Image: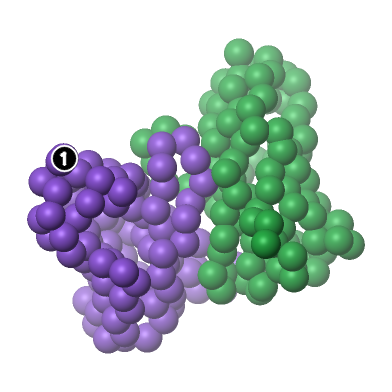
Amino acid sequence: SQELEQSPQSLIVQEGKNLTINCTSSKTLYGLYWYKQKYGEGLIFLMMLQKGGEEKSHEKITAKLDEKKQQSSLHITASQPSHAGIYLCGADNQAGTALIFGKGTTLSVSS
Amino acid sequence: DAGVTQSPTHLIKTRGQQVTLRCSPISGHKSVSWYQQVLGQGPQFIFQYYEKEERGRGNFPDRFSARQFPNYSSELNVNALLLGDSALYLCASSLVGNQPQHFGDGTRLSIL
């Protein structure tokens, strides 16, 4: 079965610093999704990547998909306290009928 | 526009009981998926429904069942509750399949 490994598991950065979170799949990626979750709450959709080499940005967050490496990265520029939370990557299963999630990366931003 | 709504927000049950969780998708979305999230883990897929038909089932025992209604809302039922069923249960909706899924705030289920 497919597994997604996220690194790092947790991250503490100073406000204003840049950071990158990685998501590596054990199998071919058909679609990759990034979500943000506040503790105990629902997931907020950030971005969807479907093609190798695809890159998308929203405000200060940029996500890239490297199909050959079966990997995606999420980069936050000039981090703010509002960026704090748990970042989850999810991937389509082969049938497109489920999302497989990584365990998440917990981000703390100190001011 | 209203997002995905789930009810109840919190629930406390005892072992052996049965529970029903409810989900209303975003207007126009025909696909509903259910996930279980235990503390410190990513969500685990339980079911996906599209146009009232089951399209996918995760690795969960038969105690878990679901259905989707003509108005695309959905219910998740869990029978013979175990302590290990304590988790946040998330519902997500999409126009179709995984493209992309939008999540509700979840139902926190605690089993005593």
Above or below for A19 versus A38: below
The answer, for residue B66, to whether it is visible in the render is no
What is the display colour for chain B? green
Q: How is the image coloured?
A: by chain
Q: What residue sits right under mark 1 in the picture? A: A110
Residue A22, located in which quarter of the rendered image? Answer: bottom left
Q: Residue at x 31, y 84 (%)?
A: A54
SS for callout 1:
strand
Is residue B62 rendered to the left or right of residue A76?
Answer: right
Tell me the residue at 73%/48% (across/down).
B23
Q: Nearer the viewer, residue B35 or B72?
A: B72
- The spot of residue A81 in percent (x, y) is 25, 46
Q: Quadrant of residue B108?
A: top right
Q: Quadrant of the N terminus of chain A?
A: bottom left
Q: Nearer the viewer, residue B28 or B58?
A: B28
Q: Is residue B30 left or right of residue A48?
A: right
* Residue B64 shows in this picture: yes
Looking at the picture, how far across and down is residue B22, in whole percent?
Answer: 75, 43
User: Which residue sits at x=68%, y=19%?
Assistant: B13
The chain letter for the residue carrying disc 1 is A
Amino acid beneath label 1: Ser
Q: Looking at the image, how many numbered discs can be counted on the residues?
A: 1
Please tell me in which quadrant of the rendered image residue A33 appears. bottom left
Q: Position of residue A6 (x, y in %)?
A: 26, 55
**Position of the C terminus of chain A by quadrant:** top left
The colour chain A appears in is purple
Q: Is residue B54 above or below residue A37?
A: below
Residue lying at 52% horizontally and 46% vertically, measured from the top left: A42
